[in-house]
Image: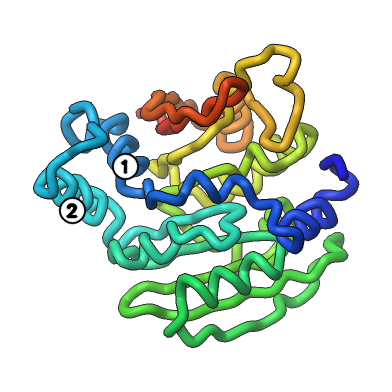
Amino acid sequence: MRLGTHNVAEFWTEAWMTNNTGWKMGERCGPFTRNLYGYLQAAGLVAAEKQGENESVEEASKRHEAVRSFLAKKTVMVPLCGDSAVLSYMVDCGVRHVIGADLNDHALNLQREKNFKNACFRTRTLDRVAGVAEKVVVHEATDGESRITLFHGDIIKLPCFDDYKNLKVDFMYDRAAMMAIPPDLHKAYVQAVTKVLTPTAGVAYERMLRLIPEERTWGPPFMVDMEEVLQMYKEATGREYASVLILEDSLDDTRRPEWYAILPKE
């Protein structure tokens, strides 16, 4: 099945049910501190020193503590979160509120079962709104002093609902999210996620660089030029943004994941 604007829900339901979830390989070694520390470096919040693979325990602890200090008491969002353990990582770092969203119910079931085993979730269906046929279900819990909110529904439609549009998000972690969406929906996606970003909120953003020119329209994962990403953010918010390359991963001879900090200009 090829992903298009007409079959987004069906495509990702089949992917989850057949365990065709190769993007999860990028979290095998729990790279969250590495990715987020890179963001802090790009934002000028910590010294711009090179991260090594064989860092000492002391260095690793220092970087993790810097990330914890950054995330503490913030409201953070992870669009298209699936069952990513980054949500529980953020809770462990003391966020005030972590928000995830996904179209697939199975993915969010795994999220709750794997990453929040001891949390008691309350589930409710949001009231229907005009012009939105699909229902949206919200799973909510607390873990210590952190709130957890998981939206089950089409993220592009979430701004129609008060529970979503009234959020004030301080930081967003976009891993394999925009790249999973058909290109025709990228603008709508950016409009939806930026709807809840505060003017000073930044984004840790992963994009897939396709190294073979003929494959650059293939997907998912879809490749999006960073200039296009910044333009979409500007059009959606009226604010200027800058991007800083923070990390490059090696995947294979045809694709290379890259991490960027997307930062609002002062």
**Which residue is found at the position 68% from the left and 42% from the top?**
180
| Residue that carries the numbered disc 2 in the rendered image | 65
Question: Between 25 and 50, which is closer to the camera in this rendering?
Answer: 25
Residue 260 visible in the displayed image: yes
Residue 71: x and y, percent? 30, 55
Residue 227 is situated, as x and y percent measured from the top left of the image, at 57, 19
Instruction: Answer with left or right where residue 210 lies relative to residue 131.
Output: left
Residue at image position (48%, 26%) is 240
100 left or right of 13 in image: left
| Quadrant of the image containing the C terminus | top left
Q: Look at the numbered disc 2 and give the secondary structure of its residue.
A: helix
For residue 215, what is the image quadrant? Answer: top right
What residue sits right under mark 1 in the picture? 34
Above or below: residue 152 compared with residue 127? above
- Residue 252 relative to residue 224: left or right: left
Counting other residues with Cα less than 10 Å from the Cα at mark 1, is it few (<14), some (14-19), or many (20 or more)?
some
Residue at the top extreme of this rendering: 213
